Amino acid sequence: MNEHQLHSTQTSNGIQRHVFSPVTESQLFDAVIRKRCVAFIIDAIIITVLWAIAVVVVAVFGVITLGLGWLLFGLVFPAVGLGYNAFTIGGPNASTIGQRMMGLTVPMWFGGKVTPLVAAFHALLFWFTLVIFFPLLLWAFFDPRKRCLHDILAGVVVINRV
């Protein structure tokens, strides 16, 4: 259990408070936006390789099943991207491979562990924001915790590993 999980996250009236403070723990948020951008590029390369492998597997399966397996092509794109995030951010390391390489971790805003379902939802919100509402990613430049809008909606925060 790390030091953030030892903090009480409830006030005397029972309302949960944010565990990670940009005022008292500014080191958690130093260069997070830059690191997230680099981590995204690394993860995009990894996901592209995984998609390519999945497409080959589905193509071979389609040949074996006389074309029926090719119906799975529509599932490859979302399954690989969401699965990658669900099993990495929602896994024991609480970060994607790119985020780990950049020294980042992704806990819940109150200090808890991100579940695979929340991690997949977070990824879905990210891709939706990236494709439809790209300017919303700029929210992080104005947020004291460097969170994008999809981070806030999913209830997560991206911080430096301590």
Image (cartoon, rainbow, N blue to C red):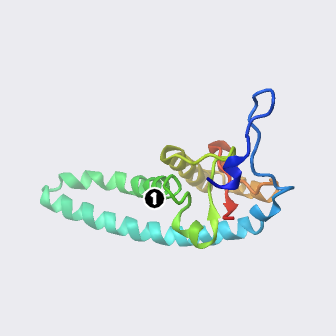
Residue 124, above or below 88: above
Relative to 81, is 61 on the left or the right? Answer: left
Q: Secondary structure at mark 1?
A: helix
Residue displayed at 79% across by 59% down? 141
Residue displayed at 18% across by 51% down? 68
Callout 1: 10 Å neighbours few (<14), some, many (20+)?
many
Q: Nearer the viewer, residue 3 or 92?
A: 3
Dividing the picture into quadrants, the one containing residue 102 is bottom right
Relative to 32, is 59 on the left or the right? Answer: left
Residue 35 placement (x, y as % from top left): 67, 70
Relative to 126, is 110 on the left or the right? Answer: right
Residue 41 placement (x, y as % from top left): 57, 71
For label 1, the residue is: 84
**Residue 51, visible in the rendered structure:** yes
Dividing the picture into quadrants, the one containing residue 66 is bottom left
Residue displayed at 21% across by 54% down? 69
Label 1 sits on what residue type? Tyr
Q: Nearer the viewer, residue 2 or 74?
A: 2
Which residue is outermost to the top?
Answer: 13
Residue displayed at 77% across by 54% down? 145
